[in-house]
Image (cartoon, rainbow, N blue to C red):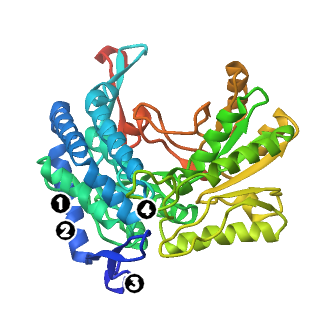
């Protein structure tokens, strides 16, 4: 791995609301990275033997710091990737809740599991495995770190992080929080390196596993390297989540859920409702109500609490989303509303409403990572299920309806890792998060998350005579 040839000699914050460079960080040399990974391994050799109560105290202390500094954390999210200040405050709180959850429940989740067996006894012991490499994206700068770091550190592992290159201040802030909480040096380490270097880092013998969230091509590269070196990996690669409006749904509720769901984080959420599937007869009314919402929102400064929609993360991201919209329209889709760049500085666009999307169009199969509401009419429930499953992705899904038993039946037919009924796909510390198909594999959060990177060690006890 030759960092001297790194074309990212610096990592910088570009404020998407202004286009101005806020701060610049130098990338790390090969030697620096090697020393930091070695330090993380040394920390693991100590940390793995600490008590659950010691680990819990550290996590509780970090949760407290995140709550005390939530305004600062939220401001960093706004400056680095355009997140609205209210969303940044929420993100700081959910991160604190995740740290607290594992602090409160980690010991129980990792307790030995007894197994009924003849001729003696047996149990599974859940033991840490070493240094975990976490490679994370920019759209939730603190949450993405937290959901990989909190369970692993509670399990006795240590973590080195390669964060997205456009949120370096958030990455540095998380390490600062660990320092302020008095964590042993090396328990959590931020690495300022490029994505390609992070993938190559998997070869380092101290790295025992890798967790990745990001694009499918990058995830494929990470998985290939992990497989090459026989190391455990988990992947979360995005999605094209359906939201099915059942025939008995309250249309006003469904419209609010879908339309505002696409405004959240400027539509830059893997589990945002990206394909809205409605009954044929609902189409015009649904679109009219959604347009009314979009015509009355405030687009502007993410630091203004009154803002409903901030900028996209970057000029490049904005151009990409606008190109997807234009290509769909050129291929025959109908742009009902918006989908245009706003005048002035910053990566701003009006939210879009698209319909008439067919399987021959790229928009049918691509993930549109921005405030674009794609509405698909279908003749009935079975057609809705078929359309929902007609994608390579399988992360989340939403069903809106009043007959819960029927909604659950539909949920069982959806090919995704998560299905939420009467709520957009969301997050909570106690709920596992992850997908299937090309959305990846493995789970984060809850019991599943803390058991991804531990050794499920079988210990079998037999009497000597039973062995013969």
> Mark 1 — residue?
39
Q: Are marks 1 and 2 in contact (CB under 8 Å)?
A: yes
Q: Name the disc covering residue 35, or none.
A: 2
**Disc 1 on helix, strand or loop?**
helix
> Mark 3 — residue?
7
Residue drawn at x 17%, y 31% as measured from the top left: 53
Q: Are marks 4 and 2 in contact (CB under 8 Å)?
A: no
> Mark 4 — residue?
301
**Disc 3 on helix, strand or loop?**
loop
Quarter residue 134 falls in: bottom left
Q: From what the image shows, is residue 148 above or below residue 196?
A: above
Residue 106 x/y as whole percent:
29, 31
Residue 22 x/y as whole percent:
31, 74
**Disc 4 on helix, strand or loop?**
loop
Q: Residues within 10 Å of mark 3 (few under 14, many from 20)?
A: few
The quadrant of the image that shows the C terminus is top left
């Amino acid at each position: 791995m030759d960092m001297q040839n790194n074309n990212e000699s610096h990592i910088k914050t570009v404020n998407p609301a202004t286009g101005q460079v806020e701060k610049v960080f130098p990338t790390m040399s090969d030697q620096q990275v090697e020393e930091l990974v070695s330090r993380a391994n040394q920390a693991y050799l100590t940390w793995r033997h600490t008590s659950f109560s010691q680990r819990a105290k550290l996590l509780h202390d970090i949760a407290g710091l995140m709550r005390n500094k939530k305004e600062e954390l939220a401001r960093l999210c706004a400056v680095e990737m355009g997140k609205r200040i209210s969303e940044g405050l929420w993100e700081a709180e959910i991160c604190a809740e995740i740290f607290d959850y594992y602090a409160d429940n980690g010991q129980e989740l990792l307790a030995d599991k007894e197994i009924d067996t003849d001729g003696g006894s047996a149990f599974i012991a859940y033991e840490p495995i070493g240094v975990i490499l976490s490679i994370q994206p920019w759209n939730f700068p603190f949450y993405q770190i937290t959901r990989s770091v909190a369970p692993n550190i509670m399990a006795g592992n240590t973590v080195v992080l390669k964060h997205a290159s456009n949120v370096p201040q958030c990455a540095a802030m998380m390490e600062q929080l660990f320092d302020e909480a008095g964590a042993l040096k090396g328990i959590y380490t931020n690495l300022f390196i490029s994505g390609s270097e992070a993938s190559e880092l998997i070869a380092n013998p101290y790295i025992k596993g890798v967790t990745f969230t990001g694009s499918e091509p990058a995830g494929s590269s990470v998985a290939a390297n992990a497989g090459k070196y026989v190391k455990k990996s988990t992947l979360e690669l995005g999605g094209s989540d359906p939201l099915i409006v059942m025939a008995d749904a309250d249309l006003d509720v469904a419209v609010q859920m879908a339309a505002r769901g696409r405004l959240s984080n400027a539509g830059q959420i893997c589990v945002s409702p990206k394909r809205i599937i409605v009954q044929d007869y609902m189409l015009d009314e649904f679109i009219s109500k959604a347009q009314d919402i979009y015509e009355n929102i405030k687009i502007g400064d993410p630091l203004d609490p009154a803002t409903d929609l901030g900028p996209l993360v970057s000029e490049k991201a904005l151009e990409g989303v606008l190109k997807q919209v234009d290509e769909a329209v050129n291929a025959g889709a109908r742009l009902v509303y918006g989908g245009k760049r706003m005048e002035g500085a910053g990566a701003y666009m009006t939210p879009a409403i698209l319909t008439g999307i067919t399987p021959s169009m790229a928009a049918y199969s691509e993930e549109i990572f921005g405030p674009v509401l794609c509405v698909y009419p279908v003749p009935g429930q079975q057609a809705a299920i078929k359309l929902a499953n007609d994608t390579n992705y399988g992360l989340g899904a939403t069903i809106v309806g009043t007959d819960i038993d029927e909604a659950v039946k539909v949920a069982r037919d959806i090919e995704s890792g998560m299905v939420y009924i009467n709520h957009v796909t969301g997050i909570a510390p106690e709920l596992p998060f992850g997908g299937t198909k090309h959305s990846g594999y493995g789970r984060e959060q809850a019991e599943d998350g803390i058991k991804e990177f531990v050794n499920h060690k079988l210990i079998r006890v037999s009497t000597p005579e039973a062995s013969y």
